[in-house]
Amino acid sequence: MNSRLLSFLPWLVVGLLAMFPLLESTFYMQLLTKVLIMAIFAMSLDLLVGYTGLVSFGHAAYFGRAEV
């Protein structure tokens, strides 16, 4: 791919995500928010368990509460 296109692509994604609340309904905004929160949770759990080998009960407690 063209390197210029690759440098423009992240800015395009950020712009689309910034315009998302203006274009979509409340349901999709809440869905996107929950998806991003779960993605952050998964990345942090992967960092703790996968790379350091630490088991975090704090993550499990938050995840159990977040699905209520």
Image (cartoon, rainbow, N blue to C red):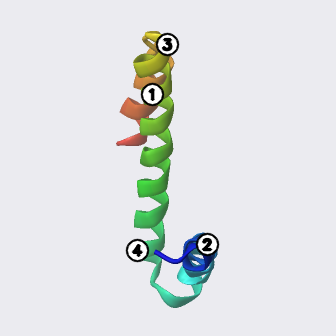
Distance from disc 1 to disc 2, alpha carbons, whole Å, reads 25 Å
Q: Earlier in the sequence, mark 4 or mark 2?
A: 2
What residue is disc 1 on? Answer: 45
Q: Earlier in the sequence, mark 4 or mark 1?
A: 4
Of circles 4 and 1, which is in front?
A: 1
Q: Earlier in the sequence, mark 4 or mark 3?
A: 4
Kindly identify the amino acid type of the residue bearing the numbered disc 3: Thr
Crowding near the residue tagged with mark 3, few <14, some 14–19, many ≥20 C-alpha atoms within 10 Å:
few
Of circles 3 and 1, which is in front?
A: 3
Which disc number belongs to residue 52? 3
Residue placed at 49% from the left, 20% from the top? 48
Which disc number belongs to residue 27? 4
Of circles 4 and 2, which is in front?
A: 2
Residue placed at 40% from the left, 23% from the top? 60
Q: Are marks 3 and 1 in contact (CB under 8 Å)?
A: no
Is there any visible trace of residue 68 in the rendered image?
no
Residue placed at 42% from the left, 11% from the top? 55
Kindly identify the amino acid type of the residue bearing the numbered disc 2: Val
Distance from disc 4 to disc 2, alpha carbons, whole Å, reads 20 Å
Q: Earlier in the sequence, mark 1 or mark 2?
A: 2
Kindly identify the amino acid type of the residue bearing the numbered disc 1: Leu
Q: Secondary structure at mark 1?
A: helix
**54 on left or right of 15:** left
What residue is disc 2 on? Answer: 14
Kindly identify the amino acid type of the residue bearing the numbered disc 4: Phe
Q: Secondary structure at mark 3?
A: helix
Distance from disc 4 to disc 3, alpha carbons, whole Å, reads 37 Å
